[in-house]
Image (cartoon, rainbow, N blue to C red):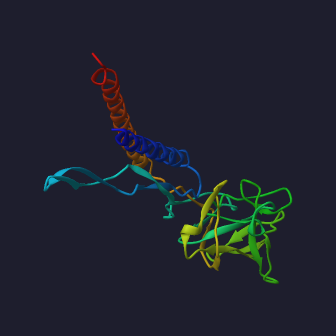
């Protein structure tokens, strides 16, 4: 019976973690370029049940009853990198990647030369004339004159881009938007501010759309259904715990009492 308590409680812990993931998805349903998460669950290793109630030749022998699971546990939190809807805007500094790829931004205090990866192309020009994201991180591009990688300096000029990410300032080709992709998306980890860290990025030629933003790929209806299912599962485990607790209480206070 004690084992049953552990099994039910492990289910409650797992459902609580799943609820946290769903809540975060719903909170970012309108966040530009956000990719929803899902919780992968696996069970604990099965335990073999046996007793010695079986009698053979006048002796008690081992009797295998079968196996039982000890409950569920969290395996991993996986990110869904499917494409979100792309919607047009009226801002020249809004960009969206159609298909695979990530924009690269640079932060002074980050690892790997401060480079982070994002699908959020809601950029703007700061007071120094540099193209940055909402957190002030510098958007990287290749200088078409010397092929060096660095900030995209827009200044006070007019910014235009083609679908290959070639950026012109006042109709003069100046930069190519630096975009990368990954062979293994499992290496990508969320670090906050809608940014990712990853290993072995490879520069690619992504399809870049100016005056457009990629919306979150979170389906609110599906998340609400998942939330209700998770809540019901949690409540079921909770009722099992209460029932087991009452049974244990009777066993200890009534059945085991000396009269």
Residue 80 shows up from this direction: yes
The residue lying at 49 percent from left, 46 percent from top is 17
Front residue of this view, candidates 251 and 184 = 251
Q: State which quadrant residue 121 falls in.
A: bottom right
- Of all residues, the one furthest to the top in this rendering is 259
Q: What quarter of the picture does the C terminus occupy? A: top left
- Identify whether 60 is placed above or below 251: below
Point out residue 29 in the picture as x, y percentages from the top left corner: 52, 49
Residue 173 shows up from this direction: no
- Identify whether 65 is placed above or below 171: above
The residue lying at 80 percent from left, 72 percent from top is 150
Point out residue 68 in the picture as x, y percentages from the top left corner: 30, 52
Q: Is residue 214 left or right of residue 51?
A: right
Q: What quarter of the picture does the N terminus occupy? A: top left
The residue lying at 59 percent from left, 71 percent from top is 101
Front residue of this view, candidates 121 and 68 = 68
- Of all residues, the one furthest to the bottom in this rendering is 146
Q: Is residue 109 left or right of residue 42?
A: right
- Identify whether 213 is placed above or below 142: above
Front residue of this view, candidates 255 and 10 = 255
- Of all residues, the one furthest to the left in this rendering is 57
Point out residue 23 in the picture as x, y percentages from the top left corner: 51, 44
Point out residue 194 in the picture as x, y percentages from the top left corner: 63, 56
- Of all residues, the one furthest to the right in this rendering is 128
Q: State which quadrant residue 258 falls in.
A: top left
Q: Is residue 84 left or right of residue 59?
A: right
């Amino acid at each position: 019976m004690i084992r049953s308590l552990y099994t039910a409680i492990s289910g409650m812990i797992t459902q609580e973690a799943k609820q946290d993931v769903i809540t975060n998805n719903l909170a970012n349903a309108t966040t530009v370029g956000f990719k929803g998460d899902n919780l992968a669950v696996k069970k604990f290793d099965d335990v073999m049940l046996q007793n010695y109630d079986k009698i053979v030749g006048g002796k008690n022998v081992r009797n295998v009853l079968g196996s039982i699971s000890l409950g569920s546990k969290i395996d991993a939190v996986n990110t869904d990198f499917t494409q979100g809807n792309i919607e047009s805007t009226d801002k020249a500094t809004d960009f969206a990647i159609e298909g695979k790829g990530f924009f690269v931004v640079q932060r002074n205090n980050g690892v790997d030369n401060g480079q982070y990866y994002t699908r959020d192309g809601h950029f703007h020009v700061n007071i120094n004339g540099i193209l940055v994201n909402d957190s002030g991180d510098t958007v990287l591009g290749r200088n078409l004159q010397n092929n060096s990688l660095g900030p995209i300096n827009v200044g006070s000029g007019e910014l235009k881009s083609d679908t290959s990410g070639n950026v012109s300032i006042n109709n003069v080709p100046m930069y190519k938007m630096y975009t990368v992709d990954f062979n293994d998306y499992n290496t990508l980890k969320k670090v906050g501010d809608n940014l990712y860290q990853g290993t072995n990025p490879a520069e690619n030629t992504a399809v870049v759309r100016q005056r457009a933003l990629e919306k979150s790929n979170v389906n609110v209806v599906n998340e609400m259904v998942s939330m209700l299912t998770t809540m019901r599962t949690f409540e079921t485990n909770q009722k099992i715990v209460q029932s087991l607790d009452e049974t244990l209480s009777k066993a200890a206070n009534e059945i085991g009492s000396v009269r």
